[in-house]
Image: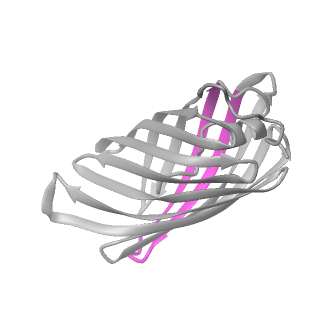
Amino acid sequence: MLLATTAANAEPVFSDRLSGGYEYIDAAGTSANAWGAQNQGLISFALPGFNLQLDLAETRTQSSGFSTDDFHGAFSGFWRSALGTLGATFAHESSSGVSVNSYGAFAEWYAAPKLTFRLKGGGGDGSIFGLAALSSSGGYGGAGVGYYPNRNVEVSLDYTYLTTSGVDVQSYGGALRWQFDTSLPLSMNLGYQHLSSNAGVDGNEVMFSLSYRYGAPGSLLRSDRMGPVDWTAAL
């Protein structure tokens, strides 16, 4: 196994992934452009063993006549071994007066040297300008799979379901991630998502980003199984 030869860490090990990207959104007859940055910091206490991760992201979305600044923060704790990860997360999202807190569990199973299965699920609540009268609660769940045709390329598919106040939203899509070289921890990410809801609103998202990794050297596959985890929160 990829992690079988890794001994327990004598001291905590820190790793980090910094990403920046662009997203094009087309929904309900309106298009928008979004630019954002994300930082994922991980402290690994042992392998196999316990890990703590902090995710922070800021996104600015612009369309004709409006713009929003969106913040995402998530704190996760999980156990990682040669078989996969199992953990819990708490996340906060805010955008133009709308605030959402979510909490849940997630898991990754390293089913084969180049194959990973993913699951997540939980609940949450939100409010508008902090008013209890304008609040709602709901839940989410998702599944995904990632395949590595070689150690520096991942092709993934995923599905996420969210429900709140009688509105159900489904999102499904895929992504291609490519690390330029094993000795250079810089990767390119291309993704697509289709969203649909029972409110009659459908949308499409096309995403491009670059990520630089610190503290988890080696291939993309090795980084994914030793560095920060993407598959944590609802969004």
Residue occupying the point 48% across, 46% down: 76
Identify whether 92 is placed above or below 222: below
Identify whether 168 is placed above or below 147: below
In the picture provided, is 1 more to the left or to the right than 186?
A: right
Residue occupying the point 31% across, 42% down: 68
Residue 65 magenta: no
Residue occupying the point 60% across, 34% down: 44
Residue 136: x and y, percent? Answer: 25, 67
Q: How is the image coloured?
A: one colour
Q: Which residues are magenta?
A: 186-214
Residue occupying the point 69% across, 35% down: 188
Prevailing secondary structure class for the magenta stretch in the rendered image: strand
- How many callouts does the rendering have? 0
Instruction: Tell me if residue 160 can be seen.
Output: no
Q: Quadrant of residue 51?
A: top right
In the picture provided, is 101 more to the left or to the right than 7?
A: left
Instruction: Tell me if residue 73 can be seen.
Output: yes
Residue 2: x and y, percent? Answer: 83, 42
Residue 180: x and y, percent? Answer: 78, 28
Residue 62: x and y, percent? Answer: 37, 41
The residue lying toward the viewer, choosing from 34 and 158, is: 158
